Image (cartoon, rainbow, N blue to C red):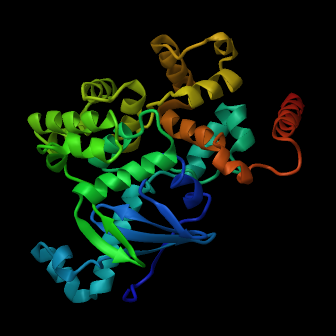
Amino acid sequence: MTSTKIFSLLCPKSELQLHVTLQCGQSFRWREISPGKWQGVIGHKVWTLTQDESHIHYSTYPKTSDDEVCTNPKAKQKTKRTNKIDVGQEKSEAVLKDYFRLDFSLEKLYSDWKKADLNFRLLCHEFAGVRMLNQDPVENVFSFICSSNNNIKRISMLVERLCQLYGTKISTLDGTTWHSFPTVSSLAAEGVEETLRAQGFGYRAKFIHKSAQMIMERGGEAWLHSLRSLSYEDCHAELMSLHGIGAKVSDCICLMSMGHLSAIPVDTHVFQIAAKDYLPHLRSCKTLTQKVYCEIGDHFRKVFGEYAGWAHSVLFSADLKRFENLKSQGNHPSQDKQAKRQKIKHNCAK
């Protein structure tokens, strides 16, 4: 592998924690290739990311060429005053800022959420820097169709298999060949369902193929991207009209790629969080009905406001077993949490 320029972007860990953000079930294409070093695909490039306390360090493969960047006379004039690496860095930095939604200040959002909710206040220090990704709708839709009755490890395996079967090759790095995410048209083609069934996708094979065909009939990827301009309610309904997309998956897509940051995906895991810490009367509920689903979403929106889906994702991440090592050491978790609650209540009473 040829040496590649490493760029740095000012971004403290309080604003972005890669370890949690890339593993909490938003995107399924990131791998920790060595401790603290992440590799994955954004668009048609492979990215390598690391971070220290103050910066994100990144490189891309293949490198951005001058021809790719300079597509208009103004850009070409600008290139005369800078070198190719500077132009490539500027474009890559813009992509990275968009992907991680770095235009939002987490310090401000966390401050608001801490004031609004005691439970959030108790865990936010260990889970600072958990960001919502701004993903491509095509990748987001078909990745979450793969998520049905599945775990993160297996979803990641199926998504990668989908890319190997129908994506285009980007780069081979350290023996690993990376592919772009498939186009909708490639997933709508003849024989896709049969191939995916043979590759272990099960009933999801039909959902992927049928949804791709429906999207193509409605205008292809342009139609899918156009959903971003709709209201949350209309966007949610349009997504649910596709095969294999129910309320929870539709909310995941609304939240993670459609810009509706108040959307609350409610699965059994989130139901348990709500019943345990917010709506104790739900503990007697045996099933997650549509009425209960809406009640949980409305409650989180009432507590956290217009970015409720983002705050909910922090709570969701904090409850995942894979991040147990980030939680306060020493006391038993429940005892530690109870002690913190009592301390905060005591201080508030003064």
Nearest the viewer among 327 and 187 is 187
Choose top left, top right, bottom left or bottom right for residue 7: bottom left
Question: At x 15% / y 36%, what residue is drawn?
Answer: 213
**Residue 217 place in picture, x, y as percent:** 9, 34
Choose top left, top right, bottom left or bottom right for residue 3: bottom left
**Residue 67 place in picture, x, y as percent:** 16, 79
Vertical position of residue 200 compared to residue 173: above or below: above
Question: At x 44% / y 31%, what residue is drawn?
Answer: 263
Vertical position of residue 8 compared to residue 308: above or below: below
- Decide if residue 232 is in sight here: yes
Question: At x 20% / y 82%, what residue is drawn?
Answer: 66
**Residue 143 place in picture, x, y as percent:** 36, 44
Vertical position of residue 108 compared to residue 265: above or below: below
Number of numbered discs overlaid on the protein picture: 0
Nearest the viewer among 262 and 194 is 194
Choose top left, top right, bottom left or bottom right for residue 290: top left
- Quadrant in the picture for the N terminus: bottom left
- Decide if residue 26 is in sight here: no
Vertical position of residue 25 compared to residue 346: above or below: below
- Describe residue 256's horizontal placement relative to residue 226 as left or right: right
Identify the residue at the far front of this view.
Answer: 198
**Residue 286 place in picture, x, y as percent:** 60, 12
- Quadrant in the picture for the C terminus: top right
Nearest the viewer among 282 and 204 is 204
